[in-house]
Image (spheres, rainbow, N blue to C red):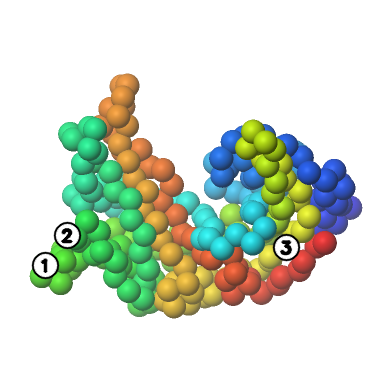
Amino acid sequence: MKDKEQIINKFHEIKELGYVKSKRRHNTGIGKTFEDYIGVKENNRSTSDWLGYEIKAHRELSKSYRTLFTKSPSFPKGANTFLKERFGTKYEDFPDVKNLHTSMFANKANSYKGKYAFRLYNDKEYKRVYIAVYSMRTKKIVDVSCYYTYEDIEIAIENKLKKLFYVAAKVKQDIKGKESFWFYRADIYEQPTLDRFINLLDEGIIMYDIRIGSYKSGINYGKTHDHGSCFRIMESDLTKLYSIHETVD
C-alpha cells in the first residue's frame, strides 16, 4: 500500500471514532491526541513524523500562525546565547539571568522593549537570511552577525515539510472543561520549494520567532534554554508554500 493511501486510511479510521478525549490539557493536547491515535511517538526530531509525512493538528476555524520548523541560526555557534545575552531582558523574578522573546518579519522592523528593532534581512547574493538588530534611538544597525544559510533552510524544508498531513478538528468541552476532539478533515500538502519559502519571507508572510530563555534552577542555572526559535506561517497561507494541495474528508 502506498504511503499516502496508508495515512489516509488511518485518518478515516480515526475520523470514524467521532469525538475522542484529549490526551493532554491546554493547546498541545490536540496534536498529542492525534499523534497517539495514529501511532506517532512524541518527538523533537528534525525529520518527518510518519510515512514521510509531517503531521500537524489544528482546531477548526483557527486563525493563528503555525510553526513550519524550529532551528537555531546557522552561524555563529552559540548564536542564541549571544542574542539573548546582548539584547535580552532580565526576568523580573530572576534579575541576574535573561530571556529574549520577539517576532519579526523581512518586510518591516518590529519594536522590542522600546530599545531595539529586529528585522530579517534576506541577502540573495550570499544566500543568507540575517537577523538584523537596530537601535531604536539611532535607527542604525547594531548587529547583523547571526544568520541562516539558504542551504540549512532548504535542508529543514526537505526534512520536515516535504509532505505535510494537516488535520482539522472540531472541539467540545465537558462541564469540567476537559476537551474532546473530532478529527474530521485533513489537508495534504506536498512539494514545497526554497524559492517559495524565500519569496514568502520577503513578502512578510512567513514570520520568525526568537524564543530564548534561561534555566532558572538546577545545575544549568543561567544557561541558555532554547524554547524553539522557529519560522511560522498563517494557516490560510500554507497553500502558497506548496505546489500540491489535496483535501481529505
Question: Which image quarter: residue 161?
Answer: bottom right
| Mark 2 to mark 1 CA distance (whole Å) | 7 Å
Residue in view at x 11 percent, y 67 percent: 137
In the rendered image, residue 139, in percent from the top left (x then y), is placed at 15, 72
Q: Nearer the viewer, residue 239 or 22?
A: 22
Horizontal side, residue 138 vs residue 164: left or right: left
Q: Which mark is residue 137?
A: 1
Left or right for 16, reference 90: right
Residue that sits furthest to the left in the current view: 138
Out of 34 and 21, give the one closest to the viewer: 21
In the displayed structure, 180 sits above or below 184; it is above
Q: Earlier in the sequence, mark 2 or mark 1?
A: 2
The answer to which of 218 and 73 lies nearer the viewer is 218
Position of residue 235 measured from the top left corner of the image (x, y, whole percent): 59, 64
At mark 1, the secondary structure is loop
| Label 3, label 1: how far apart the Cα atoms are | 46 Å
Q: Are marks 2 and 1 in contact (CB under 8 Å)?
A: yes
Secondary element type, mark 3: strand
Question: Which residue is found at the position 39% from the left and 56% from the top?
Answer: 209
Are there few (<14), some (14-19), or many (20+) residues within 10 Å of tag 2?
few
Name the residue: 71% across, 70% down.
245
**Image quadrant where one finds the C terminus:** bottom right
Q: Which residue is mark 2?
A: 115
Which residue was labeled with disc 3? 187
Query: Does label 3 or label 2 sit earlier along the sequence?
Result: 2
Kindly report the distance in space between the C-alpha atoms of the residues bearing marks 3 and 2.
42 Å
